[in-house]
Amino acid sequence: MRQAGRYLPEYNATRAKAGSFLGLAKNPAYATEVTLQPLDRYPLDAAILFSDILTIPDAMGLGLRFTAGEGPSFDHPLRTEEAVRKLRVADLSQLQYVFDAVSEIRKALIQNGKQRVPLIGFSGSPWTLACYMIDGSGSDDFRHAKTMMFSRPDLLEHILEINVQSVAAYLIAQVKSGAQALMIFDTWGGLLPDVWYQRISLAAMQKVIQLLPKEHEGKKIPVIIFTKGGGLWLKDMAQIGSDVIALDWTLSLSRARKTLLEIGKPLALQGNLDPLVLFSDPEKIAQETTALLKDLSQAPAIKPGLHPLDGHIFNLGHGISQFTPPESVSILAKTVIEQSQALRK
Amino acid sequence: MRQAGRYLPEYNATRAKAGSFLGLAKNPAYATEVTLQPLDRYPLDAAILFSDILTIPDAMGLGLRFTAGEGPSFDHPLRTEEAVRKLRVADLSQLQYVFDAVSEIRKALIQNGKQRVPLIGFSGSPWTLACYMIDGSGSDDFRHAKTMMFSRPDLLEHILEINVQSVAAYLIAQVKSGAQALMIFDTWGGLLPDVWYQRISLAAMQKVIQLLPKEHEGKKIPVIIFTKGGGLWLKDMAQIGSDVIALDWTLSLSRARKTLLEIGKPLALQGNLDPLVLFSDPEKIAQETTALLKDLSQAPAIKPGLHPLDGHIFNLGHGISQFTPPESVSILAKTVIEQSQALRK
């Protein structure tokens, strides 16, 4: 969750060299550099591609720009039926910089002939991309996207279908370039009413997953889905074919594990420390991290013979704040390693 | 949910007369005027006091101001231990304008010797007030409040205890002035991690409810609690002694009803139409509103012999947008009345 990001001084130095956020994201050498920075600093188990979720609508010609202090915006948001009808599946050749970054990162991960850690690729979910494409920028309610959903569901479905095709093709190309697991970020699914979430965002993610290869060159490509604020829909999320469900901090891992076992869906869980814990002192960070692992340790295991911590990927529950002290992440990573070993004994 | 608000031209006219939002909220005559405006326009079943949730910290001396486009902020946020230690329970005499507004509204509600509709009083929850008091303004993560919670829980508990006393006294004074039901708005409870929500925000609301009188002058004073994003904690919310649980749109009323019946807590429900439905055309507004009522109609009733719609207060799931066309609310109110009658047949 923004593993490479503004909280790291070395990231800010690379970004300054690149001149802008988009300059950084669109240059495979810089993207590789920042993707690897957190691995040099912390004992992490995976790298995640550094990129932005809005690369796809940018490649559709919506004109992405980042304004200092205001975040991303599109020059051509989808506010009319005409604009929606003109939308086409993203041209993958416009996204070659992402795939180049993936291959370059995979190469850079080789150390002494061995790959240090696996590489996770990602995309925004079809609905989350639609939010930005319709509203044209970040928002606290994505009023235009939701208004289209309620008043012209046919237009939204058209956009979602194009996004499904685009996201699937984008993720497949990442796999072909070297991504070994995939994560779909549904940052704004939690804004939807019950029933609409399932019908709109979850259904579109399911279509994406159905289009993905189960394996690549004989190796399984696990898929992680994450809907911020999606805890209420855990049982529904478990039905769409992902291997892992990532959670924010509003649902405890033990409760999630129990719910999944009740419905016979022993999926792996990812998450879910509140990123704001990282603003505490070292003892409190260790204490909260330990509490999270202990909580899951007391839940049932996903299979007989396994430990309850098997099938858990430790992560934050959402993106790390740019104001986070980098040392806090050291304490976090150290605690996760020590405590998960201790709890398994 | 902002029943009187910027979507109404008559509200904007009164606000212009008052000169500012605070000028409006602090003048009982103007507050009365805007509280009654929606009743003259729509066939509503209750009035809700027009005020702001930040009146309490303002009365504590934190220096509330509203800046155009930026919303509320405090001149003296609680950012140091010294500031926290100096905090005192709100001086009710500083809030007399609220109690005067309540009495004046009650009087103004009398028409032909009868009270048109009951009057609901309200307060922010202790935790939600603490968010603004510590961060000093609105925020998307209330980083300072949550950091205090994780790193100095003793300081946060001190603030919460003062807020509990202040909120309870404030609500009791509203009841004595004429409020006939009370609503506690926990707008930011949904930012908390599981377990912390129960320990921090819910526990403080429970303490407030325990301090409230069960009745006033022989009449029951029902208490409604609302935690935005709190659907995951419905079973916990049902335990703190409120009469009604208000929900946002992420949890369907039928699912909430079933969950409450499962745990033997047949509380009334309030909510929960997505306010953005009101940006659709009349047919879609009627369609979504009907769907919501039908959904609850198919759930079990709270008691044998009652209809499933008994024990439901129709409401939006959160505040109405300032950009809402006023005619949309007419269609909404008309549909609720017609459809709830039709569904009861």
Image (spheres, coloured by chain):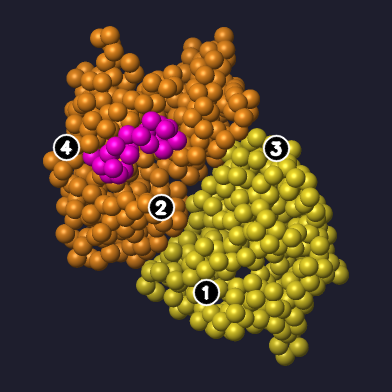
Chain colours: A orange, B yellow
Instruction: Tell me whether marks 2 and 4 sit on the same chain.
Output: yes
Task: Give me the chain letter of mark 2.
Answer: A
Asked whether the viewer can see residue B67, the reply is: yes
Q: Which mark is residue B153?
A: 3
The reply to whether discs 1 and 2 touch (Cβ–Cβ < 8 Å) is no
Q: Name the residue under label 2.
A: A69
The image shows residue A186 at horizontal and vertical percentages of 38, 43
Residue type (three-letter) at the residue carrying disc 3 = Pro
C-alpha separation, residue under disc 2 versus residue under disc 3:
32 Å
Q: Name the residue under label 1.
A: B6
First in sequence, mark 2 or 4: give its number.
2
Task: Give me the chain letter of mark 4.
Answer: A
Q: Which residue is at a point 41% across and 52% down the rendered structure image? A: A69
Crowding at label 3, few (<14), some or many (≥20) Cα neighbours within 10 Å? some
Task: Please identify the quadrant where the C terminus of chain A is shown.
Answer: top right
Q: Taking A313 as reference, is A189 above or below it? A: below
C-alpha separation, residue under disc 2 versus residue under disc 4:
28 Å
The image shows a total of numbered marks equal to 4
Residue type (three-letter) at the residue carrying disc 2 = Gly
Q: Name the residue under label 4.
A: A96
